[in-house]
C-alpha cells in the first residue's frame, strides 16, 4: 500500500488507523467474551 501521490500519504495512515481499530476491537472482544467462551481464543489466534 505504498503510494507516491498526495492522496496516498493520506490513505496510508487512514488504513493503518482502521487496521489498528479493528485489531483493538477484536482484541477487546476476545478478552471480554473469552471469559465465557474460551474457544474464541483459538479462533482468532
Image (cartoon, rainbow, N blue to C red):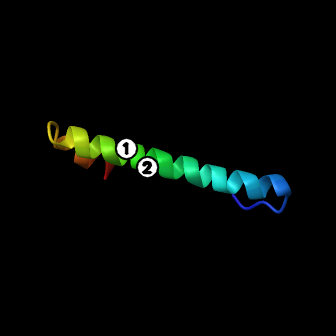
**Residue nearest the viewer, comparing 30 with 45:** 30
Residue named by callout 1: 26
At 22% from the left and 38% from the top, the residue drawn is 33
Could you tell me how far apart the alpha carbons at marks 1 and 2 are, in whole angstroms? 5 Å
Query: Crowdedness of circle 2 by 10 Å Cα count: few (<14), some, many (20+)?
Result: few
From the viewer's perspective, is residue 2 above or below residue 24? below
Q: Residue at x 43, y 49 (%)?
A: 23
Q: Residue at x 14, y 36 (%)?
A: 36
Q: Residue furthest right?
A: 5
Q: Position of residue 14 (x, y in %)?
A: 64, 50
The location of residue 16, given as percent across then percent down, is 58, 55
Q: Give x and y (percent) for residue 37.
A: 17, 37
Image quarter (top left, top right, bottom left or bottom right) of the N terminus = bottom right
Q: Residue at x 16, y 43 (%)?
A: 38
| Residue that mark 2 sits on | 23
Q: In the rendered view, does 17 fall on the left or right side of 40?
A: right
C-beta proximity under 8 Å, tags 1 and 2: yes
Amino acid at each position: 500500500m505504498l503510494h507516491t501521490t498526495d492522496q496516498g500519504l493520506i490513505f496510508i495512515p487512514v488504513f493503518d488507523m482502521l487496521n489498528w481499530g479493528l485489531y483493538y476491537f477484536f482484541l477487546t472482544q476476545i478478552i471480554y467474551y473469552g471469559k465465557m467462551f474460551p474457544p474464541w481464543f483459538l479462533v482468532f489466534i
